């Protein structure tokens, strides 16, 4: 781990970024506890996505040099700050993958319209459904509906979605933006609270150009001796999913908890 990057050391591809933030991990641990309910649950979701968005913007967004007058300019011609800021002309699309992605994407949209030129930031919406087999295992995902803007050409496209489990929904959503939405994105970035080794494998194999950001790696179904190793060193033996594809240690169904809707 480097101090500048604030990421854990791992053996996964370089496009995988697992943040090292003990405050965020403490809040995420609280979020995943069974007695964390509304309104605390959504408050923590908002806070955690502000933290992660700051890390993503600092690492991935373009910058520009400015000469910014301050209030002290009236007193002295030296009252001008010279420095580097996030380029306000950056164009972004943040994608709400319903339903667990609705609140995180909204947080990103609100924050970015306050940082960049507001008209350069848009929010898209897609509705995904998991496809399962007779045993309840997730086999794929379908896109049931969308409300996307015209083009992503030159835009940074964000997918803020809390749980990176099997990767089926995200894989399908990314495919849609690559092949069905007009234009070529400047960069595609997924943003998760937790991801599994299975998720990392699916996304990095199918979309090696996509940057993956997460606050936590969950591989709790791995053998004990594997858990003692550096993440990714024994990737083939790592697992973070139950037989019916729930994340372990995980935090349960975030979509249900966010909406107080148990379906």
Image (spheres, grey):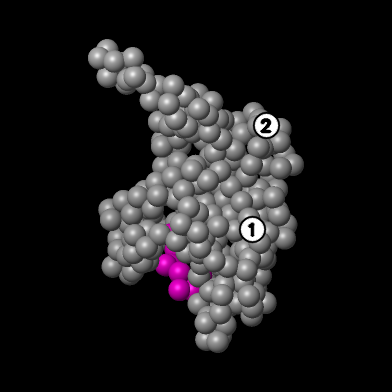
**Residue 14 numbered mark, or none:** 1
- The foreground one among 37 and 15 is 15
Above/below status of 242 relative to 262: below
Residue 56 part of the magenta segment: no
Residue 253 is a magenta residue: yes
Q: Determine the main secondary structure of the stretch shown in magenta.
A: loop
Residue under circle 2?
A: 153
User: Circle 1: is it few (<14), some (14-19), or many (20+) Cα within 10 Å?
Assistant: few
The residues colored magenta run: 247-254
Judge depth for marks 2 and 1 and give the one in front: 1
Residue at (66, 70) in percent of width and height: 133
| Crowding at mark 2 (Cα within 10 Å: few <14, some 14-19, many 20+) | some
Determine the residue positioned at 74% across, 42% down.
Answer: 179
Closer-to-camera residue (262/40): 40
Q: Quadrant of residue 29?
A: bottom left
Q: Position of residue 161 (x, y in %)?
A: 51, 52
The answer to whether 249 is drawn above or below residue 112 in the figure is below
């Amino acid at each position: 781990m480097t101090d500048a990057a604030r990421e854990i050391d791992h053996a996964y591809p370089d496009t995988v970024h697992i943040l090292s933030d003990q405050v965020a991990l403490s809040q995420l641990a609280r979020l995943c506890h069974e007695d964390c309910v509304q309104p605390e649950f959504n408050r923590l979701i908002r806070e955690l996505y502000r933290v992660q968005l700051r890390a993503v913007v600092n690492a991935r967004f373009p910058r520009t040099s400015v000469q910014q007058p301050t209030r002290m300019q009236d007193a002295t011609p030296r009252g001008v700050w010279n420095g580097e800021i996030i380029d306000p002309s950056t164009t972004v699309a943040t994608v709400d993958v319903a339903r667990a992605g609705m609140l995180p994407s909204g947080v990103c949209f609100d924050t970015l319209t306050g940082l960049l030129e507001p008209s350069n930031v848009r929010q898209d919406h897609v509705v995904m459904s998991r496809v399962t087999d007779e045993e309840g295992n997730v086999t794929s995902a379908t896109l049931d509906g969308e409300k996307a803007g015209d083009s992503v050409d030159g835009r940074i496209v964000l997918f803020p979605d809390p749980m990176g489990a099997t990767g089926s929904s995200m894989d399908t959503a990314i495919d849609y933006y690559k092949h069905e939405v007009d234009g070529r994105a400047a960069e595609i970035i997924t943003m998760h609270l937790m991801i599994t080794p299975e998720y990392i494998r699916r996304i990095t194999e199918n979309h090696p150009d996509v940057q993956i950001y997460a606050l936590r790696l969950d591989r709790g179904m791995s053998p004990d001796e594997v858990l003692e190793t550096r993440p990714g060193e024994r990737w083939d033996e790592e697992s973070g999913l139950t037989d019916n594809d729930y994340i372990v240690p995980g935090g349960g169904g975030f979509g249900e908890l966010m909406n107080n809707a148990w379906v």
